[in-house]
Amino acid sequence: QVQLVESGGGLVQPGGSLRLSCAASGFTFSSYTMNWYRQAPGKEREVVAGIASSSFGSSTTYADSVKGRFTISRDNAKNTVYLQMNSLKPEDTAVYYCNAVRRYSTTYWGQGTQVTVSS
């Protein structure tokens, strides 16, 4: 059974930091590109960051809105992808989802974790 379980969300003040984790099971994690998406109330889901499989050098990509503040990483031994979020802003408030994709394979989604940035 495939599972993606996000954790680490919560309430943080502007300028603060959070680290999200997404624990994967039930598929060959190391061969998948892993992404973090977010969806704010009333807005469409948007991609935040992605990290390729080691076959593609674990290269990373970021949305312009989070470049320099967020860092995505993965630990294939633990089947976990992380999102380190620094210098958080109120506009980062959203439900954050992890996503696993691989060509010619099913795409998987987690259930999401809430991040609220507010004073």
Image: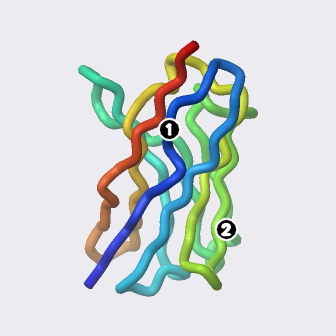
How many circles with numbers are drawn on the protein? Answer: 2
Left or right of 15: which side holds 106? Answer: left
Residue 36 has which mark?
A: none
Q: Is residue 30 above or below residue 70?
A: below
Query: What residue is shown at x 64% (from left), y 18% (from top)?
Result: 14
Q: Viewer-nearest of labels 2 and 1?
A: 1
Name of the residue lying farthest toward the right: 68
Left or right of 46: which side holds 51? Answer: right
Residue 10 has which mark?
A: 1
Q: Nearer the viewer, residue 1 or 50?
A: 1
Measure how far apart labels 2 and 1 are at the Cα level: 28 Å
Q: Is residue 67 above or below residue 52?
A: above
Q: Contact, CB < 8 Å: mark 2 with mark 1?
A: no
Q: Within the image, what quadrant is residue 79 found in?
A: bottom right
Residue 58 has which mark?
A: 2
Left or right of 116: which side holds 57? Answer: right
Query: What residue is shown at x 59% (from left), y 26% (from top)?
Result: 65
Residue type for callout 1: Gly
- In this picture the colour scheme is rainbow
Residue type for callout 2: Ser
Q: Is residue 76 above or below residue 90?
A: below
Q: Quadrant of the C terminus?
A: top right
Q: Is residue 115 above or below residue 105?
A: above
Q: Quadrant of the N terminus?
A: bottom left
* Secondary structure state at the residue bearing disc 2: loop
Query: What residue is shown at x 48% (from left), y 50% (from top)?
Result: 36
Disc on the earlier residue, 2 or 1: 1
Percent x, y of residue 103 = 37, 73
